[in-house]
Image (spheres, coloured by chain):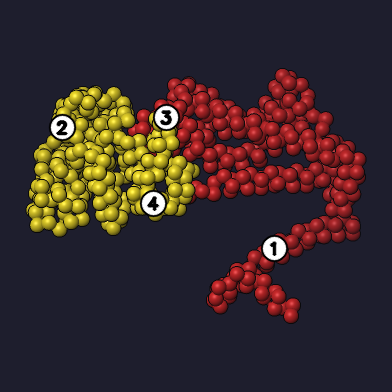
Amino acid sequence: MNRSIWVHWLERGATSETHAAYLRKLRIRQVMIWLVRISLLIGLLGGWEWATRTGWLDPFLFSSPSLIWNQAVQLAGSGELFYHIQTTTVETILGFLLGTASGISLATLIWASPFLSRVLDPYLVVLNSMPKVALGPLFIVAMGTGFGSVLAMGIAITIIITTLVIHSSFQSVDKSYLILARSFGATRSQIFRTIIFPACIPDMIAALKVNVGLAWVGVIVGEFLVSKAGLGYLIIYGFQVFNLNLVMLSLVVVALIATIMYQLISWLEHRLLRHRSVT
Amino acid sequence: MTSPYAIQVINLTHTYISKKEEIVALKSVSFDVSPSEFVALVGSSGCGKSTLLSLIAGIFPSTHGKILLYGQEVRGPTPLTGYMLQKDGLLEWRTVEQNLTLGLEIQRQATREKIAHARFLLGQMGLSHVLHHFPSQLSGGMRQRVALVRTLAVQPEILLLDEPFSALDIQNKLHLEELLIQVLREHKKTAVLVTHDLEEAIAMADRIIVLGGQPGEIRRTLEVPDEIRSLSPLKARGHALFRPLFEELWREVERP
């Protein structure tokens, strides 16, 4: 009986015997993939826990899943964990949104004036090659040790690359669209609004995706340097007092939230671009 | 609109200048097109026929010479002309309806009447059912028909067609030729068609201008006989006079 429900589920939606066999094969493979993924996770965590309990690994240096869990429960209980998560999340979201938006605005400005584009070209190249986290001390001097500096870092790391990528995307819009708009008598600003900007939305979303990752780097490094709150601060603090449980917990939380943000943008991309064919 | 001609091209020369070189694309080209006449421009690749069309559309200014549309000198794109390219240029992020109104929007003419007219034209093309579809859902022939309606929606007097059917399969191409001729006759529009397809030129045009050489010059002008002109593009291809004309045209285009 059990087996037939199982087979039934595997063959759901089938239209013929052959189709059913094909679906069964496809779905069994999918189930296997998930089983192995989950076993791998359980195996790694279990192995880690086992190794630290038997003394094969030193839990003081390598922490352990149960210690991390206890640390999480303790920090969550005091509400502290959520405060740090919130600080970092807000900084990161603001960082990549402002960085992307400013990058797109800058690209628009440069597109509007080819002369300005030529003038700024070497500056952009230098700024792009520059490791932005090296600017940290300057931000601290200018904006103090707090939210402002961390946010500035998140923006600095995303803005230049966004400008370069989006500007080149503006320039690579299919020429036949431009001729078409011209033939209707479109002005340069009309061409930008009706053709170029919407044509580049897929690239803007791609930039958003890359910038999420970059903003995390900027914000975490920013928090390493200056702040009194956030997950980057927890990592550095945990390291300084040699509480590796805290460091590991923060890393796990960073990984989780970064993944969620990335998935949200993927979802947004899917929603916005569902009508566009792959060209 | 006092001029007896829809289009007058007067001693037109165009030179493309780049850092490396200077290429003369057209040299001293002159011809006239009467209202509601259909003229085809043919010639080997690189003879400047597309350049000539873009100049008439006012996409960029010519180096020497003048183009007059109903007596008015062309100084940029005007609402008098509608321009259609081989690539349909439908915007993928807009529905068919939003694509149709692109030209109206740009010219700030998107009134309820004109939008309704665009919808009516789409119906004439047999495409009412795709109004809210996206271009990616349409076949190549349907896309080109939508592009044609988009061009017609701004109600231009003169249609400038740059190989509009050359990317289509033969069946779609013949259908579209028929449709286009019907629409042009019904609305008494003037048309200039650039094509490398000599059969298409004979089947559709009243007059064929052969360009050739580098830089391009007018080699010859051929009148299509009334017997062929009065037939639809599909039937014209079967007329007894069609082959001899084709061969004459072929020799003219092939001449070095």
- Give the chain ID for the yellow colour: B
Of badges 1 and 2, the one in the foreground is 2
Chain hosting mark 1: A
- Give the chain ID for the red colour: A
The amino acid type of the residue labelled 4 equals: Leu
Q: Locate residue A83: give its quadrant.
A: top right
The reply to whether label 1 and label 2 mark residues of one chain is no
Is residue B91 at least partly visible in the picture?
no
The reply to whether label 1 and label 3 mark residues of one chain is no
Q: Say which element carries label 1.
A: helix
Q: Which mark is first along the chain, 3 or 2?
A: 2
Query: What percent of the width, then of the height, locates residue A150?
Result: 73, 29
Question: Residue B127, which numbered label?
Answer: 4
Q: Is residue A71 left or right of residue A226?
A: right
Question: Residue B108, which numbered label?
Answer: 3
Q: Which residue is mark 1?
A: A34
Relative to the observer, which residue lies in front, A270 or A238? Answer: A270
Q: Which residue is mark 2?
A: B32
